[in-house]
Image (cartoon, rainbow, N blue to C red):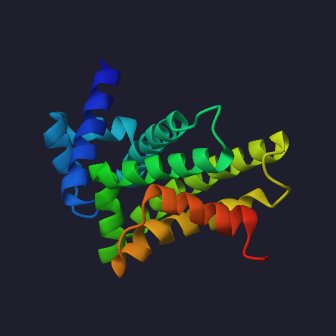
Amino acid sequence: MAIDRKWAIIEAATASFASFGYKATTIDQVAKMANVGKGTIYTFFKNKEELLDEIVTRLISEMKEAAEAAIREDDTFIENVLRALSSILTFRKDHKLAWKLFQEDRDIGTPAVQEVLLKMDRAILSFIRYHLELAIQKGEIRECDPEITAFVMRRLYIALISDWEQHHEPLGEKQIAELFELYLLKGLSK
């Protein structure tokens, strides 16, 4: 029974955060939506920040599952990373809560939201770093600093997907893969 109430609270808070944002959501509102008393929420969570963190932890887990599902054993490292990054970006765009959190961070800069978005970003970088380390061990790519390389890969991907599209025609998946290969694997030197 307690697990059901906790789940109802998490679902209500997720819906409220996704609809109204973190800052505009109140514990009273979540309690009403979950059909529980306000005190019941505090039995499971110390405060609204802890509730958001629990929800984002679950969101990160779902995002990782989506990225792992994009990995295919027989494909190259770059193909797998691009597909995984694409699935992560699609997940973030399509998930109403993630979208609302990014919007709130951009518009208001709520510290608690910035903290959970940083947690989400760290999880993405950790995922890429792990797969870089595997690729190094398998001899698919040469030795590099996996942490810096993960950062560069993520930034390059976002730049090609989002930033480029602000003033140019969107790039296709094949073009992005070719650019990744050029800039990250082959380099510009003749």
Name the residue located 51 percent from the left edge and 47 percent from the top edge.
83
Please give left or right for residue 175 compared with residue 90 in the image: right
Give above or below for 93 relative to 23.
Answer: above
- Residue 183 image-quadrant placement: bottom right
State whether residue 108 appears in this view. Answer: no
* Residue placed most toward the observer, 158 or 76: 76
User: Extreme top residue here?
Assistant: 1
Query: Percent position (x, y) of residue 142?
Result: 84, 55
**Number of marks present in the image shown:** 0
Please give left or right for residue 70 compared with residue 77 in the image: left
Name the residue located 43 percent from the left edge and 75 percent from the top edge.
163
User: Extreme bottom residue here?
Assistant: 167
* Residue placed most toward the observer, 151 or 102: 151
Name the residue located 19 percent from the left edge and 41 percent from the top edge.
31
Give above or below for 161 relative to 140.
Answer: below
Give above or below for 38 relative to 160.
Answer: above
Q: Quadrant of the C terminus?
A: bottom right
* Residue placed most toward the observer, 32 or 151: 151
Query: Percent position (x, y) of residue 151?
Result: 64, 64
Query: Percent position (x, y) of residue 30?
Result: 21, 45
- Residue 182 image-quadrant placement: bottom right
Please give left or right for residue 12 compared with residue 57 in the image: left
Q: Quadrant of the N terminus?
A: top left
User: Extreme front residue here?
Assistant: 190
Query: Percent position (x, y) of residue 43?
Result: 36, 35
State whether residue 101 appears in this view. Answer: yes
Name the residue located 37 percent from the left edge and 68 percent from the top edge.
170
